[in-house]
């Protein structure tokens, strides 16, 4: 079974530019999450989709970040305009069920991440 | 105080040794607990969920201490392949899907 895939694996852009990250979850997983890890810090939650609906976007840092999940399949995360502090690794994860169900069904599978560098 | 705290390490242990990590959490309403493993420049992967009664999976044992608000991970008979960063993940209650990650504890198993 294919895992969570993310594109691109690396992106280097200049401050002020726009970048769009893509995530393809595991087929059949209604839950899709975006996380971010900036250098030296812990992985932080950004938002959670259930199918095409945003269930929780409380972790989005500001309105420069826009996430979409059209049709409940793949998701995109756009940063516009990018700032230096946006540099980090952006992980996408998907799961069949919610975290509180526990076990494999509830705990998300992570994609390999997109390493974003803003110069 | 951070919501989830871990000793960053590194823990350098010889092959075959037993090693234990703790993770403390500040929110007493936390409901679900997990250990994830992350290899260098790779994605986190679920190692095990942590249940109230404690649970074991082969050489790995996870414990939860609600009174002191910490979870632990014990690795017996360490293998070189166990070298990785171990992330503690905590979820609050109420059907709330936002989880909090610790910064991770780095383990290096030495031949």
Image: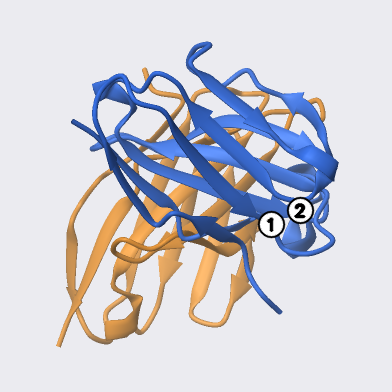
Q: How is the image coloured?
A: by chain
Q: Nearer the viewer, residue A75 or B45?
A: A75
Q: Which residue is mark 2?
A: A106
Give residue A25's mark.
1
Image quarter (top left, top right, bottom left or bottom right) of the N terminus of chain A = bottom right
Q: Residue at x 77, y 27 (%)?
A: A54
Query: Percent from the top left, x then y, of residue B18?
Result: 32, 74
Colour blue belongs to chain: A
The reply to whether residue A27 is visible in this rendering is yes
The reply to whether residue B51 is visible in this rendering is no
The colour chain B appears in is: orange
Q: Is residue B37 left or right of residue A106?
A: left
Give the alpha-carbon distance from disc 1 to disc 2, as whole Å: 14 Å
Which badge, 1 or 2, comes first in the chain's sequence? 1
Residue B98 sits in quarter: top right
Q: Nearer the viewer, residue A71 or A46?
A: A71
How dense is the environment of label 1, judged by Cα within 10 Å: few (below 14), some, or many (20 and up)?
A: many
How dense is the environment of label 2, judged by Cα within 10 Å: few (below 14), some, or many (20 and up)?
A: some
* SS at badge 2: helix
């Amino acid at each position: 079974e294919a895992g969570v895939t993310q594109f691109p694996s690396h992106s280097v852009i200049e401050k002020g530019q726009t970048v769009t990250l893509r995530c393809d979850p595991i087929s059949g997983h209604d839950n899709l999450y975006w996380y971010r890890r900036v250098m030296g810090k812990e992985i932080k939650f950004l938002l959670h989709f259930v199918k095409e609906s945003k269930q929780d976007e409380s972790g989005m840092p500001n309105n420069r970040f826009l996430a979409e999940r059209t049709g409940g399949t793949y998701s995109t995360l756009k940063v516009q305009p990018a700032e230096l502090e946006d540099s980090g690794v952006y992980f996408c994860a998907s799961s069949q069920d919610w975290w509180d169900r526990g076990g494999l069904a509830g705990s998300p599978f992570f994609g390999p991440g997109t390493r974003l560098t803003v110069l | 105080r951070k919501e989830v705290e871990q000793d960053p390490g590194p823990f350098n242990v010889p092959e075959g040794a037993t090693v234990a990590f703790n993770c403390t959490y500040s929110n007493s309403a936390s409901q679900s607990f997990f250990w994830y493993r992350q290899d260098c420049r790779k994605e986190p992967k679920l190692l095990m969920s942590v249940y109230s009664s404690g649970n074991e999976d082969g050489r790995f044992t996870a414990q939860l201490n609600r009174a002191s608000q910490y979870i632990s991970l014990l690795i017996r008979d360490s293998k070189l392949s166990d070298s990785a960063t171990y992330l503690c993940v905590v979820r609050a209650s109420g059907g709330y899907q936002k989880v909090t990650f610790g910064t991770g504890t780095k383990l290096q198993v030495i031949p």
